[in-house]
Image: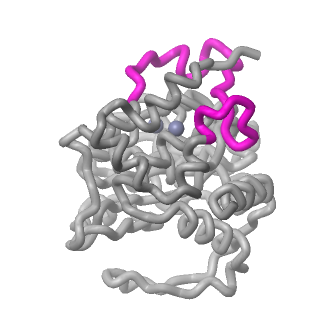
């Protein structure tokens, strides 16, 4: 199996940079945070490893892109950053696509992300309807329909029967859509996609440094291969955009896994008038990831 190899020096520069201001900023992080982030270039780290290549259809081989290091991210004046009045990430379940598209973004929204189990691309030619361009506006719609275990089977029940579309704003074919079973694998895949796409909204480009949530993926097998968390270089980008302590973030992630779905506090967002329902939260597939997060916490707290 091939891997994308970078020297210790390359990874160190991608993370810390050579810009004296950014080096200073890095040195001001607490020692535990530096110890964890430095794992990026520690040979034989058991927390972060190289990107593996399995086939010519893998993203890195088929979509050559310029890599983005921390300095390039930091100095991009066009990236979207949360501001004091706009720091809420709204995640909305959409049943009615048209209603969602027409709704105005709440005042305090950093971004609004719609998620749906409707297959948004029943035909290749429909891709343009929900383009990537919306990401820069802080609005996106993502479908998890293809993440169910039965999507690619011949007896998939969600296939659209009629495909005529009367106009570009006619979404009636999406009415009465099929809902696959909420399995742990479906939840894991959906969390990966959602956090990857929100990463793009913050200005994180595809990662070419280490195995990372921000790696591009071309197909489901490749998406399954990428980890659920960020490499140190992307983690520093997100930390610099959002402002959090690494320890608090990892602890919150462990809390999310440990909390039973029924115990999860029902926080009603300011702008939602809809009733919140308790959804199933099967987390068996997150076990390995929780162990990894726990090891990161141990490095932070050494
Ligand atoms: Zn992407
Ligand atoms: Zn990364």
Indicate the quadrant where residue 287 lies: bottom right
Q: Tell me: residue 199, above or below residue 220.
A: below
Find out whether residue 51 is within the magenta segment: yes
* Residue at x 67%, y 19% (from the top left corner): 3
Q: Tell me: residue 291, above or below residue 77.
A: below
* 132 or 201, nearer to the observer: 201
Indicate the quadrant where residue 211 lies: top right
Q: Tell me: residue 43, above or below residue 204.
A: above
Left/right of residue 296 with respect to residue 246 in the rendered view: right
* 95 or 169, nearer to the observer: 95
* 299 or 89, nearer to the observer: 299
Residue 262 place in picture, x, y as percent: 69, 85
* Residue at x 64%, y 72% (from the top left corner): 256
Is any part of residue 95 visible from this angle? Answer: no
Residue 216 place in picture, x, y as percent: 52, 31
Indicate the quadrant where residue 286 lies: bottom right
- In the picture, which quadrant includes the C terminus? bottom right
Left/right of residue 73 with respect to residue 33 in the rendered view: left
Find out whether residue 291 is within the magenta segment: no
Is any part of residue 67 visible from this angle? Answer: yes
Residue 123 place in picture, x, y as percent: 47, 33
What secondary structure characterizes most of the magenta part? loop
Stretch in magenta: 39-68
Residue 285 place in picture, x, y as percent: 77, 55
Q: Tell me: residue 201, above or below residue 54.
A: below
The colour scheme of the drawn protein is one colour
* Residue at x 63%, y 37% (from the top left corner): 223
Q: How many marks?
A: 0
* Residue at x 61%, y 58% (from the top left corner): 178
Left/right of residue 89 with respect to residue 257 in the rendered view: left
- In the picture, which quadrant includes the N terminus? top right
């Amino acid at each position: 199996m091939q891997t994308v190899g970078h020297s210790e020096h390359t990874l160190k520069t991608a993370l810390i940079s050579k810009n004296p201001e950014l080096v200073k900023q890095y040195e001001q992080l607490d020692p535990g945070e530096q110890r964890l982030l430095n794992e990026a270039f520690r040979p034989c780290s058991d927390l972060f490893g190289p990107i593996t290549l399995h086939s010519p259809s893998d993203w890195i081989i088929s979509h050559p892109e310029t890599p983005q290091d921390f300095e390039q991210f930091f100095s991009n004046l066009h990236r979207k950053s949360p501001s004091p009045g706009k720091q809420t990430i709204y995640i909305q379940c959409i049943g009615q696509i048209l209603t969602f598209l027409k709704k105005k973004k709440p005042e305090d929204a950093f971004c609004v992300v719609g998620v749906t189990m409707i297959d948004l691309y029943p035909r290749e030619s429909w891709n343009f309807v929900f383009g990537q361009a919306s990401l820069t506006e802080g609005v996106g719609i993502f479908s998890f329909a293809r993440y169910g275990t039965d999507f690619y089977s011949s007896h998939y029940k969600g296939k659209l029967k009629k495909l005529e579309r009367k106009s570009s704003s006619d979404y009636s074919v999406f009415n009465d859509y099929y809902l696959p079973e909420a399995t742990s694998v479906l939840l894991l895949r959906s969390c990966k996609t959602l956090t990857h796409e929100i990463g793009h909204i913050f200005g994180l480009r595809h990662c070419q440094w280490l195995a990372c949530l921000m790696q591009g993926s071309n197909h489901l097998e490749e998406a399954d291969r990428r980890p659920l968390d960020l490499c140190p270089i992307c983690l520093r980008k997100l930390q610099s955009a959002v402002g959090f302590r690494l320890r608090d973030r990892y602890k919150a992630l462990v809390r999310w896994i440990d909390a039973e779905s029924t115990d999860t506090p029902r926080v009603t967002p300011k702008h939602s008038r809809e009733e919140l329902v308790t959804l199933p939260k099967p987390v068996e597939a997150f076990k390995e990831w929780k162990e990894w997060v726990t090891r990161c916490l141990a490095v932070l707290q050494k």
